Amino acid sequence: MKVLVYLGYQNQDLDPDLINSGMGGTEVAALNLSEGLAKWGYETYLGGQVKSGSRNGVTWLTIEECKKHHFDFVIAASYLHYLKEFSNFDKSFFWFHNTDFHPWFRGEAVIGQEWLEDPRLTEVIALTNWHANSLKETYNISKPISVIGNSINRDTFPRWEVKKEPCSFIYSSARERGLYRLLELWPDLKKSMPEATLRVFGPSYDVDNSQLPKLNGVHYMGSVDQMTLHTWQMKSEYWLHPTAYEETYCITALEMQYAGCIPITTNLAALTEVVSDRGFLMNLDETNADFISIVKAIHGSPELKSKLRRKANEWAKQQSWKFRIEEWVNLLKKYEDR
C-alpha cells in the first residue's frame, strides 16, 4: 500500500539531510509518522515543499513529484487544498493540527464547510477530544472524526540521571501563550520564594533582547537544541504556564510531564486532557496571587510533588510514537479493503 504524508507549503524547503533545520511541530510529527509507517511495511512518501531524497525508508517528494504517483492513502497535515491539487489517490485523511486550516490556495479561498464534504476525504483526524468537538461545532463535519494524539521522541531526552534544581521554573512556548502574564506575576512570586529561578527558552528569547524585561531570577536562554532543552525540562521543578491560548494538544505539556516538571496551567481547551489531574489546572480569571499560592502549596509538599511527577511520567511514557503509529496502522487497515 502506498501512503503519502503530505505537508503542503512551508517557509523553506525541508531537506532530508538537515531534518533539524526549520522543522516545526507539525513537520516533526509528519516525519515520525511517515518513518513509522515505513517500518510497518507501507511504501511511504513524505511530500510537500521539500527537497527530493530519502530517509529511513521514506521517499521525499516535491509537490510536482507527488502528482506523478498514485497513492492508496493520503494523510494531509493542515493544508486542505490537497483535495484540489491532487486527483491521484483513493482515500485520504485530513490531519488537523490547529482549529482551522490554511485558508488560501493559489488565490482561491479554501471553503472548509464545502471542501470537508469531498467524497475523497475519508476521515478527519483530531488531536484530542476537545479538538474533535471544536471541529464539529465550527464546521459541522459529517465525516467520521478519529482522535489520535501527539507524541514525543524519547531519544531526544537525556538517558542519564538529571537532578532537579530546587525551586526552578521553565518556559518554552511563544510569548503570547502565557509569558506576558508569567513575567507580570514573577516579582511577587520571587518575593514569596526568594530562591526561585525562571529559564525562558526559544528563538525570541535571546539574552540580549531589549524588548524583554530584566527581572531578578529570570534567565533568557535563547534557542537551543532539543537535547539541551529537554535536559533543562528535567532539571526544572515547575512549568508555570498561565495561558489564555486554546491548545489543540500542547506537546510542551507532554514533554514537561515526561521530564517530571510539574505543570501549573489553565483549564482551557485540550489542556484539561493533556494535563488533567497530573498537574494543577487553574481558572483563567484567578489572580496572580492564586497562582502563586498554588505554587507555594505544591512546593511545600514533597509527597505531592513526588505523586504528581510519578503519575505524569507514567502517562507520558505511554504517549510514545510506537503506540501512535499502531493507532494509525489500525486506522489504515480499517479502509484497506474497502
Image (cartoon, rainbow, N blue to C red):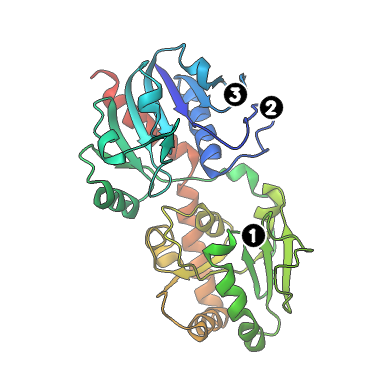
The residue wearing badge 2 is 17
Residue 185 image offset from top left, x and y in percent: 58, 80
The numbered dot on residue 69 is none
Sequence order check, earlier mark of 3 and 2: 2
User: Circles 3 and 2: CB distance less than 8 Å?
Assistant: no
The quarter in which the C terminus is drawn is: top left
Which amino acid type is marked by label 1?
Met
Which amino acid type is marked by label 3?
Asn
Q: Quadrant of residue 196?
A: bottom right
Tell me the element at label 1: helix
User: Circles 2 and 1: CB distance less than 8 Å?
Assistant: no
- Camera-nearest residue between 313 and 97: 97
Above or below for 298 versus 246: below
Determine the CA span between mark 2 and mark 1.
Answer: 29 Å
Taking the view exactly as shown, the residue that stands out farthest to the bottom is 191
The residue wearing badge 1 is 234
Determine the CA span between mark 1 and mark 3.
Answer: 29 Å
Residue 37 image offset from top left, x and y in percent: 46, 26
Q: How many marks?
A: 3
The numbered dot on residue 56 is 3
The quarter in which the N terminus is drawn is: top left
Residue at image location 41% in from the left, 53% down from the top: 248
Above or below for 242 versus 41: below
For discs 2 and 1, the disc positioned in front in the rendered view: 2
Which amino acid type is marked by label 2?
Asp
Q: Quadrant of residue 60?
A: top right
Sequence order check, earlier mark of 1 and 3: 3
For discs 3 and 2, the disc positioned in front in the rendered view: 2
Tell me the element at label 2: loop
Q: Quadrant of residue 23?
A: top right
